[in-house]
Amino acid sequence: MEDVKVLGFWPSPFSHRVVWALKLKGVKYDYIEEDLPNYKSQLLLQYNPVYQKIPVLVHGGKPIAESLVILQYIEETWPENPLLPKDAHERALARFWMQFGLQKGPIFVAFFTTAGEDQEKATREALEALEIIEEKALGDKKFFSGDSIGMVDIAYGWLAYWFPCMEEAVGLKVLNPATLPRVHAWIQDFKEVPVIKENLPDYGKMLAYMKKQRAKFLSHLPSLNH
Amino acid sequence: MADEVSLLDFWPSMFGMRVRVTLAEKGIKYEYKEEDLRHKSDLLLKMNPVHKKIPVLIHNGKSVCESLVIVQYIDEVWKDKSPLLPSDPYQRAQARFWADFIDKKIYEPGRKLWATKGEEQGAAKKEFLDIFKILEGELGDKPYFGGETFGFVDVSLITFYCWFYVYETFGKFSFEAECPKILPWAKRCIQKESVAKTLPDQKKVYEFVLEMKKMFGLD
């Protein structure tokens, strides 16, 4: 049995995706915490020379980078407890929604790293994206993948835990349960899934980290009107 | 029951071409529908309500959107002919990694080469060439990115080849000088009927860009 290693970083929603998938499939692994952003280890530079980012999965010494690529590799290598549908069209839809999350990522980053007009624009665009997720991605389903969580839910995990934390760090509420009831319900249900619940960073620690990051981003912005 | 396949597309789109090459590789009969992107059809808006973009594959009434999602779908459904993704999961992961790299890195700096000037264009040119040098490194001495056979990564990248004259002319560089391994690889891919019959002539794409620049006041 070849060994599995995960290079991760405790506040990263992306390394959590990999941890959740491995745990859902009962795969044993060694977790290596990278000391980002202070420095990138030799191991990280060796295993992910193109992006130099976590997460990286290393299976029998062979590295794989990019969390969504890693998720599909995990799915194909350990088929128990499948995270993708069997039907090809359903699978294409799952991949479509994972792509959508990837494409909209920069909007949520902008929400966290900007202020003033730029942040207002990001907030508007974030709401538009959330409305699409509410109506078209979730629809009437409990989870993106149906009655139980799958790869798409894992991919949107950042929305359930990291985004509300970002809202608190920034001091702006975007996710209104009244206008996004399905997303709100999904967030509560997702966080209750045992593997997820047991594998989330401490909220207080996460919030402190995000507040520090937020302050750093604000200090780099051109001077705002006070 | 015969499969009904149609493709909503736009002839110069390197994303749409990926689907056309794949359909040709697999010998799939389909109906091609050219979209006028300034007047999008009701069918396009219905089949891709989220992005309202081409390409869209419609298979027996159901739509698949996003070019690399479509290519994987076709590869999985018509799996007996010309497989594009390798069978080994690790090789598949590497193929997906590089296709994703190509998908997110090339288009924007490429667009800036012909749509912008001055500093912005200069920065885009550096970024564009850096990306192709990384791809050259990944190709190495292999005939194709996939190894011995034409595959998923080759499909993802080759469709930019018909835009090379545009990039070289506006960017004022030559692929031959900057990334010498890329042209022999492209010429090898062009030997394949599916690629040769799909990719429009480089000059035709250049004329299209000239028209677009005039239309959008980018001269």
Image: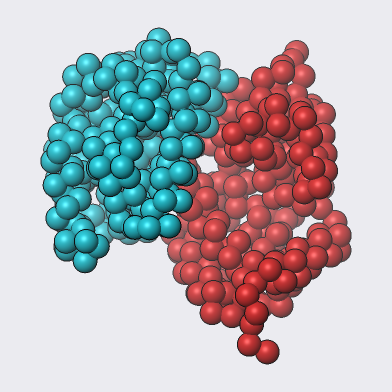
Chain colours: A red, B cyan
Q: Quadrant of residue A59?
A: top right
Question: Measured from the top left, where is residue B192 in percent x and y?
Answer: 23, 17
Q: B94 or B56, which is in the foreground?
A: B94
Residue A25 can be seen, yes or no: no
Question: Measured from the top left, where is residue A214 in percent x and y?
Answer: 73, 68
For the point 18% across and 30% down, which residue is it? Answer: B198
In the rendered image, the quadrant that contains the N terminus of chain A is top right
Residue lying furthest bottom:
A226
Image position of A105 (left or right of B105): right
Question: Measured from the top left, where is residue B64 in percent x and y?
Answer: 33, 43
Count all numbered tags in the image, as a single digit. Answer: 0
For the point 63% across and 75% down, which residue is it? Answer: A222
Residue lying furthest top:
B148
Question: Measured from the top left, where is residue A217 in percent x and y?
Answer: 70, 66
In the rendered image, the quadrant that contains the C terminus of chain A is bottom right
Q: Quadrant of residue A176?
A: bottom right
Query: In the picture shown, does residue B133 fall above or below A155?
Result: above
Image position of A70 (left or right of B182): right
